[in-house]
């Protein structure tokens, strides 16, 4: 493990499952507060969250851990394509190892898109989660998702999307194709994680944009109907796939209230 520090932030390169991962930790001055662990979207990274984790840390007083998954950000680039179960691998193997090495025992997981799905898998397999904040999560594949991901492929090949992603990833092409190829693979149409929902016992806050181009409220209803723990839903009008960017104030307020209720 290597690290650099400033007054309240610690940047690490941590080896997990044989790969060096980029990790940012924001310390808390308050004792006995839960730690928030951020799980990014398919093309996300530490930097792609922008200031959102820091702002949430300031509002809640909680410690925060943000990391870039293998193949993303400044973590090791992908050596081979993802498999259909790449989110299962993250939730069942990589995330538990990372939390163990960082000595985080009862986190609140804050997951966006793929990160929300990984949070569901982890929480369904472990009873050590204090709460889930799920931003535009997926529990099954919809036609809308596939159509939008196919459109993203065209955009990557014909627009400046590659350049924009290059600001957040060591190897933007490998990051993009690692995500895009598997979501468009015929076998991935059968991907489904609803089996984990009844095993979740902690409270969940699900935040969904009603204009989300990658998923519909059917995802949210499946979570609300099947989860073993209480589920609070915030549906946002005029909001697309990234509520934390489209409606940051409303999302910050909702998460802060949720953390206050489950962090006692």
Image (cartoon, rainbow, N blue to C red):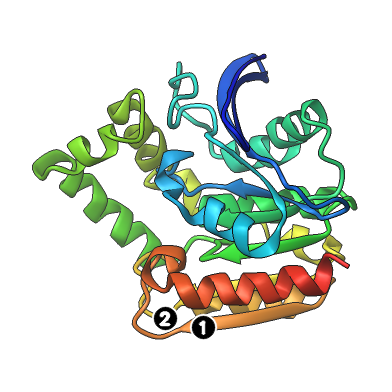
Disc 2 element: loop
**Residue shown at 37% from the left, 70% from the top:** 246
Q: Which mark is residue 143?
A: none
Circle count: 2
- Please identify the quarter of the rendering in which residue 262 is found: bottom right
Q: Is residue 207 above or below residue 27?
A: below
Label 1 Cα crowd, 10 Å radius (few <14 / some 14-19 / many 20+): some
**Residue shown at 61% from the left, 18% from the top:** 3
Disc 1 element: strand
Residue 102 or residue 151, whichever sits in front:
102
Q: Position of residue 91 (x, y in %)?
A: 69, 41
Residue 29 or residue 256, whichever sits in front:
29
- Please identify the quarter of the rendering in which residue 85 is found: top right
Q: Is residue 234 above or below residue 169?
A: below
- Please identify the quarter of the rendering in which residue 131 is found: bottom right
Q: Most extreme residue toward the left, as rendered?
A: 158
Q: Which residue is mark 2?
A: 210
Q: Position of residue 205 (x, y in %)?
A: 67, 72
Residue 18 visible in image? yes
Q: Are marks 1 and 2 in contact (CB under 8 Å)?
A: yes
Q: Which residue is mark 1?
A: 235
Residue 191 visible in image? no
Q: Position of residue 178 (x, y in %)?
A: 40, 33
Which sits earlier in the primary sequence, circle 1 or circle 2? 2
**How far is the residue under mark 1 from the one under mark 2?**
6 Å
Q: Is 14 placed left or right of 122 in the picture?
A: left
Q: Is residue 88 above or below residue 133?
A: above
Q: Quadrant of the N terminus?
A: top right
Label 2 Cα crowd, 10 Å radius (few <14 / some 14-19 / many 20+): some
**Residue shown at 35% from the left, 42% from the top:** 180
């Amino acid at each position: 493990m290597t690290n650099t520090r400033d007054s309240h932030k610690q940047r690490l390169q941590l080896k997990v499952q044989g790969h060096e991962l980029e990790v940012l930790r924001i310390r808390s001055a308050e004792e006995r507060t839960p730690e928030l662990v951020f799980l990014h979207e398919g093309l996300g990274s530490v930097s792609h969250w922008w200031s959102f984790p820091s702002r949430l840390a300031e509002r809640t007083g909680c410690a925060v851990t943000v990391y870039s998954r293998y193949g993303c950000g400044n973590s090791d680039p992908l050596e081979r394509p993802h498999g259909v179960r790449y989110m299962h691998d993250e939730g069942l193997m990589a995330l538990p190892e990372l939390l163990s090495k960082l000595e985080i025992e009862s986190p609140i997981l804050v997951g966006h898109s793929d990160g929300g799905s990984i949070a569901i898998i982890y929480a369904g397999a472990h009873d050590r989660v204090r709460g889930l904040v799920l931003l535009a999560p997926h529990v099954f594949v919809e036609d809308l998702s596939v159509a939008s991901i196919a459109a993203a492929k065209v955009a990557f090949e014909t627009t400046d999307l590659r350049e924009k992603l290059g600001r957040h990833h060591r190897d933007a092409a490998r990051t993009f194709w690692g995500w895009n190829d598997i979501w468009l693979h015929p076998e991935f149409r059968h991907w489904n994680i609803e089996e984990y929902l009844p095993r979740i016992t902690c409270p969940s806050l699900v935040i969904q944009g009603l204009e989300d181009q990658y998923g519909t409220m059917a995802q949210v209803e499946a979570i609300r109907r099947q989860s073993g723990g209480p589920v609070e839903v915030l549906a946002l009008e005029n909001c697309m796939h990234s509520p934390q960017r489209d409606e940051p104030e409303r999302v910050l307020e909702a998460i802060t209230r949720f953390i206050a209720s489950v962090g006692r």
